[in-house]
Image: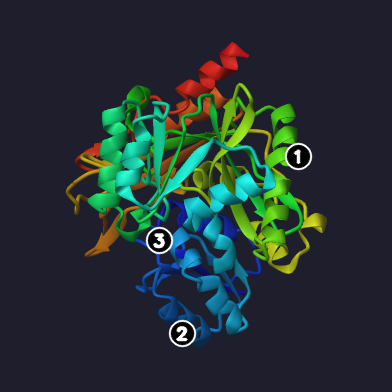
Amino acid sequence: MRILVVGGGGREHAIIRKLRENKDVTEIFALPGNGGIARDATCVPIDAKDIDGIVRFSMEEKIDYAVVAPDDPLVLGCVDALNEKGIPCFGPRANAAIIEGSKVFSKNLMKKYGIPTAAYEVFDDAEKALSYLDTAPIPTVIKADGLALGKGAIVAMTLEEAKAAVREIMQDKKFGASGDQIVIEEFLTGPEVSVLAFTDGNVVKPMVSSMDHKRAGDNDTGLNTGGMGTVAPNPCYTPEMAEECMKTIFLPTIEAMNKEGRTFKGCLYFGLMLTENGPKVIEYNCRFGDPETQVVLPLLRSDLLTVMQATTNGTLAQTPVDFADENACCVIMASKGYPQSYEKGYEITIPEAVADQVYVAGAALKEGKLVTSGGRVLGVTAIGKTLQDAVDAAYKATETVHFDNAFYRRDIGARALKAQEDK
């Protein structure tokens, strides 16, 4: 089988590594891929948002199955375009990908179908939003309606911060047209949990839960990022909680999308807050999370391609989705200055002994050498019998990898270990 994976980050590297385990896979193409992915797949310099280019390449290369991994091409209709040419895909069509593509849509969907989430108001006028804030409870959360590289949600602890966020998103257009509408929502508290789930539009099979670390600095300080590390499973997410989420959130979401004529197939990501009043949805993503994928897929025992094809074919009920009873930890190595400005072009040294544990996100090949080309450069993952084993092994491996101007958090997993102790 000739497989195409759209995307070029650490998430795609993790997906490609897992797909390679299937003996029927003869070749994997990554569009565009990156310098590190080139070790595991044939990289082709076609942008993930170039839908026409992706379709043309897929036809020329007689692709048997495509995995559309990032949010942008999903929202732009990449799956629709490939399906029209008879190419089966993993991922939702555009009318279902809107569940991530529009925060306003997803909040209204939850309200309509009684799916627990934070109370909210929607605004398309900055002045009205600013006036509303004068009487709104603070802290609050301001979200751009559209896609914003995972950075479109701002937690405002003061009225001044809230108003600055509205101006930044709606007037200064920090996220472009994604900020034409905003959601202002209730500030929730409690442990956060990420749950990725396979679905064929009828059946939901959740993957192992995980805990992300969004802030750039230790002890959750600094700016929000796309994610500085993850651990799995999340100790706050008990079997009882999983059962409740299936009943009140996961299945109702899939059923709601069906009722709206927007059947969702692929990976649906549930960002949850475990509040005093039960689990609530913070956000949906229409695809695998990054860096959650880098801890979840290494624990998958079942064949990934088989499971993906089952979501496409509607046979997920009959397809086993099993995970190892182990723990995983991923430490993100980033360029100094991320998530703002940073320098590129530093050579990366990855010892052969840990190469299989390293997922490459922001790196390019220059004269045969791997060099930094992004903010989040690498994800170093380790598996252990216990969470502490996984954390220790991930940091031990991270210390052997080098590039100038590298930084990483030293406390990935600390919150989860404390949650274990407190049980």
Figure check: 314 above or below 399: below
Q: What residue does disc 2 label? A: 56
Q: Amino acid at mark 1?
A: Lys
Structural crowding at the residue carrying mark 1, measured as other residues with C-alpha within 10 Å and reported as few (<14), some (14–19) or many (≥20): few
Q: Secondary structure at mark 2?
A: helix
Locate residue 331: give its quadrant. top left
Alpha carbons under labels 1 and 2: distance apart: 42 Å
Q: Earlier in the sequence, mark 1 or mark 3?
A: 3
Alpha carbons under labels 1 and 3: distance apart: 35 Å
Contact between marks 1 and 2 (CB within 8 A): the answer is no
Q: Amino acid at mark 3?
A: Gly
Structural crowding at the residue carrying mark 3, measured as other residues with C-alpha within 10 Å and reported as few (<14), some (14–19) or many (≥20): many
User: In the image, residue 297 lies at what x, y percent?
Assistant: 58, 47
Q: Earlier in the sequence, mark 3 or mark 2?
A: 3
On residue 8, which mark appears?
3
State the residue at coordinates (61%, 28%).
Answer: 385
Q: Visible in this render: residue 253?
A: yes
User: In the image, residue 246 lies at what x, y percent?
Assistant: 73, 40
User: In the image, residue 143 lies at what x, y percent?
Assistant: 40, 44
Q: Nearer the viewer, mark 1 or mark 2?
A: 1
Alpha carbons under labels 3 and 2: distance apart: 19 Å
